[in-house]
Image (tube, rainbow, N blue to C red):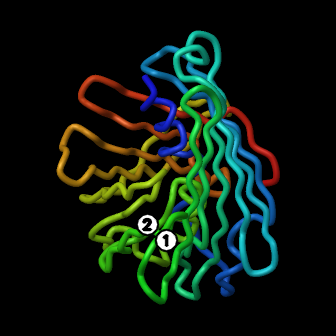
Amino acid sequence: MKSMFHLFVSILAGMLAIAAAPAGASGFLPETVKLTYNVKLYETDLGNLVTTMQRNGDSYEVEAETRAEGLASILLGGILREECSFSVSESFEVKPRYYTIEKEGSDAYSHSAEFLWDDMKVAYEGGRSLDIPLAGYVIDNCTVPYAFAAADQIMLKEYPYIHILGGRNLRHYEDIQVSHETVEVPAGKFETVRIDQQRVGDSDKKLSIWVAPAMQNIAVRIEERRKFRVTTMELSSSEGL
C-alpha cells in the first residue's frame, strides 16, 4: 500500500500537452495555475492531490501535496510534499533545475536533487548521483504536469524514451502512443489527446494521460495500470487557466 502513496505523485497530475505555443519559449505556460485531482484505486477514493505552479522570472516554481483520506490515511501515513523548479528551453523542452520530496509520518523521509545539465548528472545530497540519459526527454515527478505543454513543437512521438525522476530513482518509459478520446471527469466532459507509454522492461506497467485542449491542455485524467492494480487521478477543479 505504501507504493500507492508514492504513485499519487509519480503520476502527478495536470500534464499539459499538444498545444500550439507562441513564439517565445517562456510564454506558453500559464503565469499561475492550481489543479486539484481526486485519486482512486479502482473505484475506491484514496484522497486528493493539489499542485500549484507560478512563474518567477525565467523559471517556474511548483509545489505539490498529496493527502490520503479515510482508511488510506491510516495505511499510507502522512502527507507527501514535492517542490521543484524548471526553465523552458528555446526548443520548448522543460529543463528541471532541482527537485525535492518529503514524506511525513512514522516512515518519514526527504530527498533533494539538482540537475547538472553540463555534466549530465542528477546530484543528490550526500554525494550520490545518477547519470542523465542521453536519449529521450528527462523530467521529474514535479514537472510532469507542465512538461508537455508544447508537445507538438518538441515532437513527442519521436522521443524514444521519457525518463521521470521520482524519489531517488529514474523511471524509464517507451513506446509513446498518441490518440484521441472523449472522457468525463468531475470537472466536466472533454475531448482529449491521450498519451500512452509503457515502462521499460515491464509490460504490466503502463502510464496514460488525457490532456484537454479546451482546458489549456492540462491533464484531466491520469492512469497507471499494473498487473494487479489500476490507480486513477481525475481533475476536480482548476484555477488560473
Residue marked by disc 2: 128
Q: Residue furthest top?
A: 71
Amino acid on which disc 2 is placed: Arg
Label 1's element?
Answer: strand
Seen in the picture, residue 241 relative to 26 is either above or below; the reply is above
Amino acid on which disc 1 is placed: Ala
Q: Is residue 56 left or right of residue 74?
A: right
Give the number of callouts.
2
Name the image quarter holding the C terminus: bottom right
Seen in the picture, residue 167 relative to 25 is either above or below; the reply is above
Q: Residue at x 74, y 58 (%)?
A: 53
Residue 68: which quarter of the image?
Answer: top right
Expressed as whole percent of the image width and height from the top left, the position of residue 84 reads 65, 61
Q: Residue at x 61, y 78 (%)?
A: 88
Label 2's element?
Answer: loop
What label sits on residue 211 in the rendered view?
none
Q: Which residue is drawn at 58% across and 59% down?
A: 112
What label sits on residue 123 in the rendered view?
1
Seen in the picture, residue 111 relative to 224 is either above or below; the reply is below
Report how far apart the C-alphas of labels 2 and 1 lie in the structure: 6 Å
Residue 149: which quarter of the image?
Answer: bottom right
Tag 2 near tag 1, CB within 8 Å:
yes
Expressed as whole percent of the image width and height from the top left, the position of residue 142 reads 59, 55
Mark 2 neighbour class, 10 Å CA radius: few under 14, some 14 to 19, many 20 or more: few
Expressed as whole percent of the image width and height from the top left, the position of residue 231 reads 43, 29
Name the image quarter holding the N terminus: top left
